[in-house]
């Protein structure tokens, strides 16, 4: 029986003046079993291994999974199918899987063409990978022209390219967004959201991408600093706080993960063997010839305030 497993991790982080102020990594494991058979497949065990204690909590979804109580350490079953993560982003390479799983779940899913969420987990605050770095610089000249320079960098330690990047720059009210000019071309001004959006298909490991936007400052700003009125104007502008352009970057990284979580699927023990009669186990026959096909990815939502 082939079990398709999809592992998705979401990194949400906020930086202020280049320093991290908030970070969370949440994950979900989804499963799917394909077959032409009319009867539902037997249940199986999904075992999670956490060699570097990256997982703070893991919870089952009531629809298809239940927790298997912890048992004393025992060798892995020869009938199990497992997968260990490749080199990770900003974290230590994984060690060999431990002999005892950190979390175990009984999974019962129908034959289906869609994935079912089985386990949701949250990583510890100590896990702080840095897949991308975002830097910005703002300049306003004496004539009221505002230039914003952005640089998005991919960490050289990333295990794969970043894909489907969207870079949103939010424009403050004192700036005339409709006067936008971008380099390279392609930035789109959204008047309703007051942001400029760039779409980048791919950013290679260790690569950098630079964006520039140019605007004209609004009439209120020009009146307040006397733009174009000589030396007196320059002195006022030096005292003026530069406009602030928050940035939001979203992207994906396929075939990679942020934590060192490892997993396997295994035959589930019978009620008599487990000693947990009535704890969600069924009398279905054991899962035959289990195999697992694992797909990984992580997503990033990186905000610079």
Image: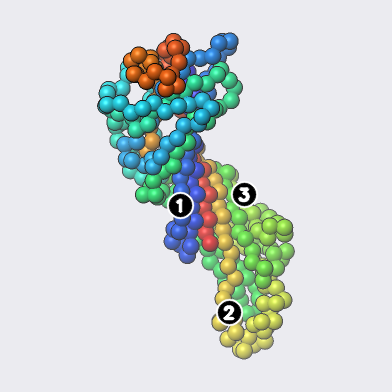
- Badge 3 marks a residue whose secondary structure is strand
At numbered mark 1, what does the secondary structure look like: helix, strand or loop?
strand
Q: Give the Cα distance between marks 1 and 3.
A: 24 Å
C-alpha span from label 2 to label 1? 32 Å
Q: Earlier in the sequence, mark 1 or mark 3?
A: 1
The residue lying toward the viewer, choosing from 99 and 57, is 57
* Pointer 2 local density, CA inside 10 Å: few below 14, some 14–19, many at least 20: few
Question: Which residue corresponds to mark 3?
Answer: 199
**Horizontal side, residue 247 vs residue 88: left or right:** right
Estimate the spatial distance between the alpha carbons at disc 2 and disc 3, rounded to whole Å. Answer: 32 Å
Q: Residue at x 37, y 38 (%)?
A: 260
Q: Earlier in the sequence, mark 2 or mark 3?
A: 3
The residue most toward the bottom is: 232
Does residue 120 show up?
A: yes
What colour scheme was applied to this rendering of the protein? Answer: rainbow
Vertical position of residue 158 compared to residue 82: above or below = below
Residue marked by disc 2: 240
Tell which residue pokes out farthest to the front in this image.
278
- Residue 77, given in percent of the width and then of the height, sits at 32, 19
Above/below status of 241 relative to 267: below
Residue at the spot x=61%, y=76% of the render? 141
**Relative image position of residue 203 (x, y in whole percent):** 52, 47
Looking at the image, tell me whether mark 2 or mark 1 is earlier in sequence order.
1
Q: Nearer the viewer, mark 1 or mark 3?
A: 1
- Relative image position of residue 180 (x, y in whole percent): 69, 63
Q: Quadrant of residue 273?
A: top left
Asked whether residue 203 is in view, the answer is no
Disc 3 crowd, CA 10 A, few/some/many (<14, 14-19, 20+) = some
Q: Residues within 10 Å of mark 1 (few under 14, many from 20)?
A: some
* Residue identifier under label 1: 23
Question: Residue 169 lies in what quarter of the image?
Answer: bottom right
């Amino acid at each position: 029986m082939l079990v398709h497993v999809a592992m998705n991790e979401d990194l949400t982080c906020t930086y202020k003046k280049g320093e991290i102020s908030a970070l969370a990594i949440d994950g979900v494991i989804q499963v799917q079993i394909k077959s032409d058979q009319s009867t539902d497949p037997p249940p199986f065990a999904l075992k999670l291994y956490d060699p570097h204690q990256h997982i703070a909590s893991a919870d089952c979804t009531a629809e298809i999974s239940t927790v298997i109580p912890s048992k004393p350490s025992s060798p892995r079953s020869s009938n199990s199918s497992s997968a260990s993560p490749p080199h990770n982003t900003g974290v230590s390479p994984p060690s060999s899987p431990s002999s005892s799983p950190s979390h175990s779940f009984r999974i019962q899913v129908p034959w289906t063409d869609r994935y079912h969420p089985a386990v949701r987990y949250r990583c510890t605050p100590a896990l702080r990978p840095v897949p991308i770095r975002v830097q910005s610089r703002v300049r306003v000249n004496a004539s009221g022209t505002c230039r914003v320079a952005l640089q998005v960098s991919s960490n050289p330690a990333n295990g794969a390219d970043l894909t489907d990047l969207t870079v949103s720059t939010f424009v403050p009210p004192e700036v005339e967004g409709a006067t936008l000019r971008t380099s390279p071309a392609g930035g789109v001004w959204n008047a309703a959201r007051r942001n400029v959006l760039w779409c980048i298909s791919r950013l290679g490991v260790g690569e950098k991408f630079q964006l520039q936007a140019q605007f004209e400052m609004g009439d209120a700003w020009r009146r307040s600093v006397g733009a174009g009125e000589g030396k007196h104007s320059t002195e006022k502008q030096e005292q003026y706080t530069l406009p602030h352009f928050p940035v939001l970057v979203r992207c994906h990284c396929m075939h990679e993960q942020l934590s060192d979580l490892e997993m396997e699927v295994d035959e589930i023990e019978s009620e008599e063997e487990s000693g947990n009669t009535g704890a969600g186990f069924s009398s279905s026959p054991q899962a035959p010839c289990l195999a697992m096909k694992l797909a990984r990815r992580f997503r990033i939502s990186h905000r610079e305030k």
